[in-house]
Amino acid sequence: MVSLAASPVKGLVSRLWYRSERYLYMKNSLVLWLGFVGVCGLAACTSLNHAADDAGTDGNLPGAAGGSTGAGGAAGSAGKTGAGGFAGGTADAGGVSDAGTGGVTGAGGMTGGAGGAPAPALLAIAPTSKDLSLVVIGLYAEATFEISNNGGVATSLPMVTLDGADAAQFMISNNACAAAIAPGKSCLVTVRFVPNSPGLKMARLNVQATLGGAVAAALQGSGITPGALTIDPANQSFGSVTQGQRGTPVAFTVINTGGETSGALATMVSASTELSITTDGCKGMTLAPSARCTITVTFAPTSGDRRAGRCR
C-alpha cells in the first residue's frame, strides 16, 4: 500500500477537497441569503400593500403612500372614499387597475372650497305703484316706499327724484336713503301728493345708484274740490196763509256740488219763529259728491204782517 500521508499528492487532494467544500458552502449561503431577501421583499411588499390599503379606507389619511410605493390598485381606493383624491391621482401604482381612478373620483382637494365673488348690488322698490286716491285741493296725502338692496355688496349713494307730467304736484317729504345701502338692508322714501287743481294727476318716483341700478314706482292721485252744499230752490215763497193756520209744506233739496264727501249735516231755520222744519231727510247725513237730500218747511203765521226766514 502506498502511503499518501507525506506525499505531495495527498496535499493536493486535501486542498482540492477544501476548496470544493468552501465553494459548496458559499453557494448554499448565497442561496439562503437570496431566499431570505426574497422572503423579506415579499413581506415588505405585503406590508406596504396593507399600508396603502389602510390609507385608502381611511378618509383622513393623505393616501400618498400608494403613489410613492406604486403598490397597486389598493391605493386607488383612497380616491374613491374621498380622502385626498389629489394624492391618489399622482400614484401611478404599478399599472394594476384602480390607482388612476382614485385621482379622478377623489374629493377634489385642489379647488379648496365653494367660494366665489359676491353678487353685485341690486336695488328694489316696494310697492311699484301707488294710488293716493282723492285729495281735496289745498290738502295732501302721503305714500311711503321701501328701497332695498338685494345684492351681495353695498350700493353707491342712491339718487331719489320725481318726474312725469304732474311731478310738480308731488314732492319728496322724507328721504331716509341718504347713504349707501348695505346688502340685505333697506331705507324709506315718503312722497306727498299736494294737488292744486282738480283731476287725475300722474308722476313717477325714481331711485338709481351707480352700484345698484335703477328702480321706479308709478304715482297717481286725483285732486278734488272741497265738499260744497247748495240748497234748491235758493228762494221760496209760501204764499198767503191765514193767521193761525199752517200752510202747505214746501220741499228744499240739499246737494253736494263739491268733489269731497261732506261731513254730517245739521239743519235749522233761522230768523223766523213762524217757519219750521216739518220733515228732515238731511240731519246727520253725509253727502258724497253730487248726492242730495230733502227737507220740508211749513209756514204758520201768527200775525198779518209779511214774514221772512232762512233755512240752513
Image (cartoon, rainbow, N blue to C red):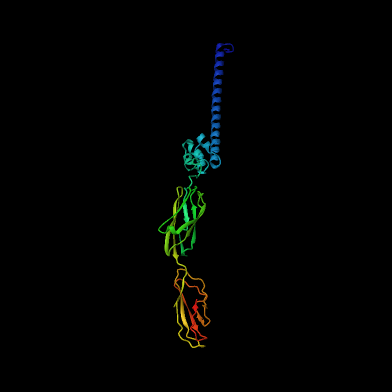
158 lies left or right of 61: left
Q: 306 or 258, which lies in front?
A: 306
In the image, is residue 33 above or below residue 307?
above
The total of numbered circles placed on residues is 0
Q: Residue at x 55, y 29 (%)?
A: 37
Q: 154 or 117, which lies in front?
A: 154
Question: Picture quarter containing residue 259?
Answer: bottom left
Q: Residue furthest top?
A: 7
Q: Position of residue 8 (x, y in %)?
A: 55, 11
Quadrant (top left, top right, bottom left, bottom right) of the N terminus:
top right
Residue 281 is at least partly visible in this image? no
Q: 15 or 126, which lies in front?
A: 126
Q: Position of residue 196 (x, y in %)?
A: 44, 62
In the image, is residue 130 above or below residue 40?
below
Q: Residue furthest left?
A: 165
Q: 197 or 26, which lies in front?
A: 197
In the image, is residue 270 above or below residue 14?
below
Q: Residue at x 46, y 81 (%)?
A: 251
Q: Position of residue 263 (x, y in %)?
A: 51, 71
Residue 166 is at least partly visible in this image? yes
Q: Residue furthest right?
A: 5
Q: Position of residue 70 (x, y in %)?
A: 50, 35
